[in-house]
Amino acid sequence: EGPYFNKFSGNPVNPGLSFFPKINKGSSVIWYSTTTTGEGYMKIVDYTTVIEDKLKVYDTHLENMNNSSYTVDCETPGFKKGSDDVCRFKRESLGNCSSGSFGYDDMQPCFYLKINKRIWVHCKGKRAADVEHMGIIDYYPYQGFSGYYFPHFSIHSYFSPLVAIKFRNLTSK
């Protein structure tokens, strides 16, 4: 598995949505504290290290592909994507979630979605308590997954785009 191949590549039935950072393998619940330590709580550095490691892969790929004839900058004004074009994903499109503490120091954590097929994504709580504690959510890029990244054909120069989700005012327990 990698940024351009994963277990869902070539399977149009399953869009292959994943997220990170996911520290606790058995759960999608995120527990962290800027001051508390103990069972169930992770340190900020645990999350930011995972994020930085994942984003460095994108940085390295972008450096390698900038001079490649296989990839194009699809964010150029007036750009029209050709059928063989592969769009470069730029880390800076993740806005406030592209560097630094990724919002964790400010209790405004960023999470990242990775996908290999176009679908609609909207965050909302499953239960009333979830909704109550989630607060305002920002998406980077604001429009979500841009259509020009799709379709793709699992070629080496393709990297799945990311969308960052920032929870601006989570309430604590």
Image (cartoon, rainbow, N blue to C red):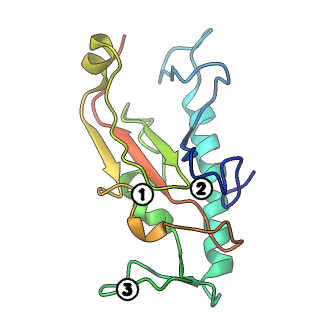
**Horizontal and vertical percent for residue 1?**
75, 51
Q: Are marks 1 and 2 in contact (CB under 8 Å)?
A: yes
Q: Distance of mark 1 from mark 2, alpha carbons?
A: 10 Å
Residue holding disc 3 = 80
**Horizontal and vertical percent for residue 12?**
57, 52
Q: Nearer the viewer, mark 3 or mark 1?
A: 3
Residue holding disc 1 = 94
Q: Is residue 173 left or right of residue 99?
A: left
- Local packing at callout 2 (Cα closer than 10 Å; few below 14, some 14-19, many 20+) is some
| Res 62 quadrant in image | bottom right
Helix, strand or loop for disc 1? helix
Residue drawn where x is 63% and y is 90% of the image: 69
Q: Are marks 3 and 1 in contact (CB under 8 Å)?
A: no
Residue holding disc 2 = 55
Q: Are marks 3 and 2 in contact (CB under 8 Å)?
A: no
Q: Specify the quadrant that holds the C terminus.
A: top left
